[in-house]
Amino acid sequence: MSHTIKGIIFDLDGVLVDTAKYHFQAWSQLGESLGFTFTLEDNERLKGVSRLASLEILLSIGKVNLSDEEKKSAMEKKNKNYVNMISQMTPEGILPGALDLLLELKDKGVKTALGSASKNAPLILEKTGLADYLDAVVDGNRTSRAKPDPEVFLLAAEDLSLPPEECLVFEDAEAGIEAARNAGMKTVGIGHRDQLGKADLLYPDLIGVTWSRISEKLSALGG
């Protein structure tokens, strides 16, 4: 049985804004302070991963051992650097195509929500002006379980007063696509097929992606 999509849930990093470069710079600075180089290739392994798990990967790359206390302090240092960078963000930090799609959804009366693991999401939304285009925001400050657990998307559906099967999720990480599927939602992958092959629809980015186009494709899928 197909369901009419009435709500769209967006991941933040890599879908609506590009903060990946700031994460990379902040992790890279931390690696440098610990005496090793953290590369862009290494950074790929941190996509959609929690802060602590990211630190563990970074430390294994640099073959560095830290106590729990030192780990806590390292994460605080990384986050402080990252927050300093995103504090300088402006609406120019919104990825191409994202605003056009959000405006079209608003116009068509489709509800929109954010479903992100980022605890810094409120600051990013404020700096870019994206908060004005979203009906609900669920971020890392409200969730206790990381993707692929569906918690973040189920909370967003609840905030939109919609059943999960009437929600569509936009994601750029494999764990995010999995989380949305675990929530019983249809998915749009933004990125490459090798990582997002399980998504119902796939686009390299949001340029030229319209609600009409998506609806048509979902109908063809029986969604």
Image (cartoon, helix red, strand yellow):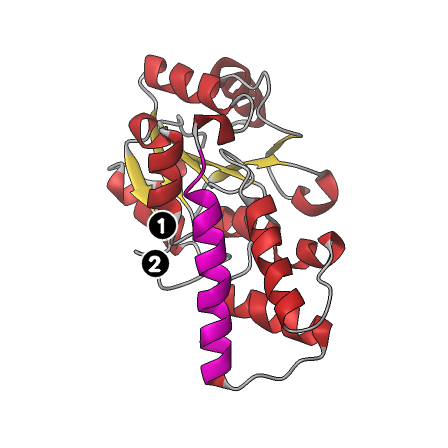
Residue at coordinates 62% horizontally, 69% vertically from top-left?
33
Q: How many marks?
A: 2
Residue at coordinates 48% horizontally, 66% vertically from top-left?
77
Camera-side residue: 5 or 194? Answer: 194
Q: Dot 1: few (<14), some (14–19), or many (≥20) neighbours within 10 Å?
A: many
Residue at coordinates 45% horizontally, 44% vertically from top-left?
86
Magenta-colored segment: predominant secondary structure: helix
Determine which quarter of the picture holds residue 106: top left
Question: Image check: 57 left or right of 91?
Answer: right
Could you tell me the amino acid type at mark 1? Asp
The residue that disc 2 covers is 143
Q: Dot 2: few (<14), some (14–19), or many (≥20) neighbours within 10 Å?
A: some
| 82 vs 9: above or below | below
| 220 vs 137: above or below | above
- Disc 2, disc 1: CB below 8 Å? yes
Question: Image check: 162 left or right of 219?
Answer: left
Cα–Cα span, label 2 and label 1: 7 Å
| 136 vs 181: above or below | above
Give residue 208's mark.
none
Question: Image check: 60 left or right of 183?
Answer: right
The answer to whether residue 74 is magenta is yes
The residue that disc 1 covers is 139
Could you tell me the amino acid type at mark 2? Thr
From the top left corner, tell me how far across and down residue 122 is, in percent.
33, 44
Query: Dot 2: what SS?
Result: loop
Determine if residue 28 is in view. Answer: yes
From the top left corner, tell me how far across and down residue 14 is, in percent.
56, 39
The span picked out in magenta is: 69-89
